[in-house]
């Protein structure tokens, strides 16, 4: 067992552009940052959870958020589920939240964000059913479709479909005994 | 010599008078820009003058304002620092005093690379936060959007213009129209312009109706980019969203057209066509003081 893998996005930014920047600005910068994050994620595959820490980032613009957040998520979603990793975003302040949500909604994406109170939150574009199912799994920690079917009220097959979709979008993790909520404190396998 | 007279008050609207005088002249015609009687210029006016000089095949002559305080302000705004390379200055320009004008958030600054955008935003970050909250009485969350709007506006040069441009940001009391403080961002370039940028990416729609005005609406209002990626073209959407929230104004001029997001306090028109031609793209952003607190 190892400690959770955390990537300090500000440190990546400074390393990627070789400057003492604290702001995520411009598409070129975003591309350089994303490429470096992708390389670090490659080292943490096979179902591991990586925490992307934005807490030291100052300002952010749409172009950079599109490159760093949206394109990274698109890449993860298109990856092979059996080998790809999972990402939790943390330190996205209220100032950034609106902008990040806008970028996510434009692409039809969602992410799990760890809030200041320590609770994970789903932001971006998700259906009502997906949000409900995600919340139920988060409260339980782990759940299979049969556990949620009664509360959901739409039958086990429907719930299984929703959970599968959340798993495909890497908003939940598929474990041996059901679907598992993403939790940045969880230790990497 | 063809004399082009600069209006006494030079802003985004009155700059059209300069372009109208230039329109009948070929690009290589010898011109003299006469700003002797100009007493006031907005950031847009100053950056557009530099942009105009870049479009001329023959280096234009330039006569600075005769009023000392006007000329001195232009100097502090960095106008002459760049004008001396782009114009043949007729007469003398004031020595640039080292102290900075308190109204100026960002003196005229060249932008051509992504690094320049970082530099611009980081240079004005603290001062912008103070001006937006203290002078414009906006909530602190307006500061983040301001930096985003500035960054996206400057990136338009880096991504699409094909040549360097200019940015300037200033806070002033807009007595003429509002009697309120405003912050104005001007971003001007003499590059390929929006229509040619879209054409270069094969983003021209399948319609016979295609001109500078249609191209501008497509880019600014519909978020079309010359790049096919789904995430492109969101910069203008972000700027417009920010300005709607804080009752600001955006006007974009490119080629022979201009489109504007007009806030309730203004009576500008949403779109103008058949204007005198101006190469490149010129952005005007104005954020007003909040008075309905």
Image (cartoon, helix red, strand yellow):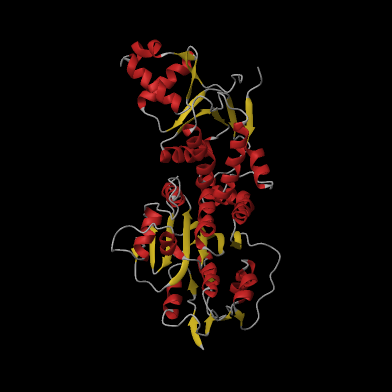
Residue farthest left in this picture: B208
**Residue closer to the observer: A97 or A160:** A160
**Residue closer to the observer: B38 or A93:** A93
The residue lying at 41 percent from left, 33 percent from top is: A125
**Residue closer to the observer: B54 or B17:** B54
Relative image position of residue B38 (x, y in whole percent): 52, 76
Picture layout, residue A71 above or below residue B5: above
Residue farthest bottom in this picture: B1
Relative image position of residue B120 (x, y in whole percent): 61, 55
Left or right, A20 with reference to B220: right
- Count all numbered tags in the image, as a single digit: 0
Left or right, A19 with reference to A177: right
Which image quarter holds the C terminus of chain B?
top left
The residue lying at 51 percent from left, 47 percent from top is: A63
Relative image position of residue B203 (x, y in whole percent): 39, 57
Picture layout, residue B55 above or below residue B117: below
Camera sees residue B266: no
Left or right, B249 with reference to B146: left
Picture layout, residue B224 above or below residue A119: below
Camera sees residue B169: yes
Location of residue B95 by image quarter: bottom right
Location of residue B74 by image quarter: bottom right
Relative image position of residue A158 (x, y in whole percent): 33, 19
């Amino acid at each position: 067992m190892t400690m959770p893998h955390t990537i300090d996005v500000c440190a990546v930014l400074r390393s990627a552009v070789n400057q003492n920047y604290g702001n995520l600005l411009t598409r070129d910068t975003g591309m350089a940052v994303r490429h470096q994050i992708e390389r670090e994620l490659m080292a943490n595959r096979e179902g591991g959870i990586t925490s992307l820490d934005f807490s030291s980032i100052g300002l952010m613009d749409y172009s950079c958020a599109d490159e760093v957040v949206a394109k990274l998520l698109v890449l993860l979603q298109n990856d092979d589920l059996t080998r790809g990793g999972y990402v939790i975003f943390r330190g996205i302040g209220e100032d950034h939240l609106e902008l990040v949500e806008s970028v996510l909604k434009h692409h039809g994406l969602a992410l799990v964000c760890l809030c200041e109170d320590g609770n994970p939150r789903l932001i971006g574009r998700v259906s009502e059913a997906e949000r409900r199912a995600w919340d139920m799994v988060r409260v339980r920690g782990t759940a299979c479709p049969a556990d949620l079917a009664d509360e959901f009220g739409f039958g086990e097959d429907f719930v299984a479909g929703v959970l599968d979709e959340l798993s495909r979008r890497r908003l939940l993790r598929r474990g041996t005994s059901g679907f598992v909520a993403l939790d940045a404190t969880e230790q990497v396998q | 010599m063809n004399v082009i007279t600069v209006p006494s008050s030079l802003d985004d609207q009155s700059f059209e008078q300069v372009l109208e005088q230039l329109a009948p002249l070929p690009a290589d015609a010898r011109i003299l820009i006469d700003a002797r009687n100009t007493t006031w210029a907005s950031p847009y006016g100053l950056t557009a003058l530099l942009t105009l000089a870049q479009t001329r095949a023959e280096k234009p002559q330039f006569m600075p304002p005769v009023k000392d305080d006007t000329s001195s302000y232009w100097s502090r705004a960095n106008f002459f620092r760049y004008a001396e390379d782009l114009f043949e200055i007729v007469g003398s320009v004031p020595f640039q005093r080292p102290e900075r004008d308190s109204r100026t958030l960002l003196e005229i600054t060249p932008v051509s690379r992504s690094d320049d955008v970082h530099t611009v935003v980081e240079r004005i970050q603290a001062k912008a936060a103070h001006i937006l909250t203290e002078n414009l009485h906006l909530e602190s969350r307006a500061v983040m959007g301001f930096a985003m709007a500035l960054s996206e506006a400057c990136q338009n040069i880096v991504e699409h213009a094909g040549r360097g441009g200019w940015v300037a940001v200033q806070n002033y009391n807009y007595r003429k129209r509002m009697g309120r403080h405003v912050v104005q961002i001007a971003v001007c370039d003499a590059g390929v312009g929006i229509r040619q940028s879209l054409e270069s990416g094969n983003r021209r729609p399948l319609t016979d109706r295609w001109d500078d005005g249609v191209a501008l609406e497509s880019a600014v209002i519909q978020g079309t980019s010359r790049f096919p990626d789904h995430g492109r073209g969101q910069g203008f959407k972000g700027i417009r969203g920010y300005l709607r929230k804080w009752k600001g104004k955006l006007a974009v001029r490119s080629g022979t057209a201009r489109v504007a997001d007009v806030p309730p306090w203004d009576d500008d028109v949403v779109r103008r066509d058949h204007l005198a031609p101006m190469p490149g793209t010129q952005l005007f952003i104005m954020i007003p003081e909040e008075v309905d607190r």
